[in-house]
Amino acid sequence: MIKWQWLTYTALSKNDLYAIMKVRQQVFILEQQCFYLDIDDLDSCAWHLIGRKADADQPNAICAYLRVMPPGAVFDECSIGRVLTSASVRGRGMGKVLMQNALMKIDELYPGEKIRISAQAHLQPFYTDLGFMPVSQPYDEDGIAHIQMLK
């Protein structure tokens, strides 16, 4: 079972922020070998969705995470980024649950607002199933093919 928690930047504890940075580095930098500046000055305006296993040996360990950005922060539309699941929960539908939570939060915060994402190109079918449509050709972002998608 996953315990979900939405937090603004100011509500994040030091332990929360540390755990977020740790899991983002683990997934994006180490596993995907994508060397980029993860700390991008955007976390402070984001809503952060943290998923933790209720039975985890390490109670602060994050197994699912994303951030929701307000309109104008990254794109004209609101956006979802830094979407990840840890290796321990992959292949169990956790990514879909994570994104569904984000879509509900965006509907609550920004009703009727369009959502633009910069998705890894190989995940296009996953995001299409969630209602996103491609609106760009694939492009390179930090050494990984991405595509912009809109919902």
Image: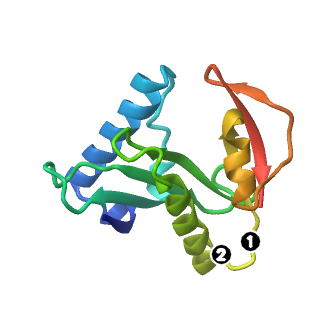
Residue beneath the point at 22% across and 52% down: 14
Residue occupied by mark 1: 113
Marks 1 and 2, how far apart in space? 5 Å
Give the number of callouts: 2
The correct choice, above or below, for 137 with respect to 79 in the image is above
Q: Is residue 120 left or right of residue 62?
A: right
Q: Which residue is mark 2?
A: 110
Against 117, residue 31 (above or below) is above
Above/below status of 83 relative to 87? below
Q: Helix or strand or loop: what does disc 1 sit on?
A: loop
Does residue 105 appear to the left or right of 31 in the view shown?
right
Residue occupying the far front of the picture: 92
Is residue 90 among the parts visible in the rendering? Answer: yes
Relative to 78, say whether 106 is above or below.
below
Is there a contact, CB below 8 Å, between mark 1 and mark 2?
Answer: yes
User: Regarding mark 2 in the picture, which secondary structure is present there?
Assistant: loop
Image coordinates for residue 27, horizontal then vertical, percent: 42, 33
Neighbours of disc 1 within 10 Å: few (<14), some (14-19), many (20+) = some
Mark 2 surroundings within 10 Å by alpha-carbon count, few (fewer than 14), some (14 through 19), many (20 or more): some
Looking at the rendered structure, the kind of residue marked 1 is Glu
Q: Nearer the viewer, residue 42 or 28?
A: 28
